[in-house]
């Protein structure tokens, strides 16, 4: 065997050893799924509505104007749920005419705010 062949054999052995050592690390582990009968989990469906903030804002309520004829009303939002378009907490009040997207859950007639993104 010459030097070139010996070098190729060493590289092949090293490559095979790496494959054998690394393959179990990437293998998926088995998981077991256990179900409990009679348990129902419900979660509110979060929807989104975009528009501009209206000029009149009752306390604890956000009114936005959309493309539809009637303004949309969203209840119970506070200081921890308003973010700017980069995901940072929004400081200050939402100015009339500001473009917003409201993420909310509806429980029939009331739409409770999950969070608000101010685009302007």
Image (cartoon, rainbow, N blue to C red):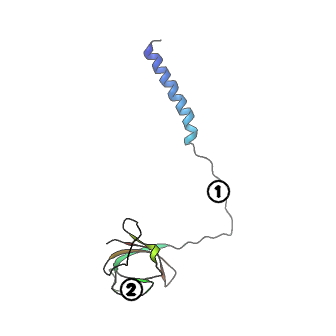
Residue at point 63%, 51% (across, down): 31
Q: Residue at x 30, y 80 (%)?
A: 97
| Nearer to us in this view, 63 or 5 | 63
Identify the residue at the far front of this view. 92
Q: Residues within 10 Å of mark 1 (few under 14, many from 20)?
A: few
Residue 91 in the image: above or below residue 60: above
Q: Mark 1–mark 2 contact, CB under 8 Å? A: no
43 in relation to 26, above or below? below
Q: Secondary structure at mark 2?
A: loop
**Of the image marks 1 and 2, the number of the one nearer the N terminus:** 1
> In the displayed structure, would residue 77 be above or below residue 37?
below
| The disc label shown at residue 57, or none | 2
x%, y% of residue 75? 46, 82
Badge 2 crowding class, 10 Å Cα cut-off, few under 14, some 14 to 19, many 20 or more, is some
Q: Position of residue 1 (x, y in %)?
A: 48, 12
Q: Nearer the viewer, mark 1 or mark 2?
A: 2
Residue 112 x, y percent position in the rendering: 48, 79
The C terminus lies in quadrant? bottom left
| Rendered residue at 53%/74% (across/down) | 44
- Residue at the far right in the pictured view: 37
75 or 88, which lies in front? 88
Question: Residue 15, position in %: x, y?
Answer: 50, 29
Which type of secondary structure does the marked residue at label 1 adopt? loop
Decide if residue 64 is on the left or right side of residue 1: left
Q: Quadrant of residue 40?
A: bottom right
Label for residue 33? 1
In terms of depth relative to the viewer, which is nearer, 35 or 56? 56
- Answer with left or right where residue 101 lies relative to residue 36: left
In the image, which disc is placed on residue 113?
none
> What distance separates the C-alpha of mark 1 from that of mark 2?
49 Å
């Amino acid at each position: 065997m010459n030097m070139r062949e010996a070098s190729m054999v060493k590289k092949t052995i090293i490559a095979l050893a790496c494959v054998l050592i690394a393959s179990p690390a990437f293998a998926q582990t088995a998981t077991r799924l256990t179900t409990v009968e009679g348990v129902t989990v419900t979660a509110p469906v979060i929807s989104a509505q975009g528009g501009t903030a209206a000029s009149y804002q009752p306390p604890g309520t956000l009114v936005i104007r959309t493309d539809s004829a009637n303004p949309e009303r969203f209840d119970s939002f506070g200081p921890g749920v308003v973010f700017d378009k980069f995901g940072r907490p929004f400081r200050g009040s939402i100015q009339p005419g500001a473009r917003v997207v409201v993420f909310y859950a509806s429980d029939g007639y009331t739409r409770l705010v999950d969070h608000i993104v101010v685009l302007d």
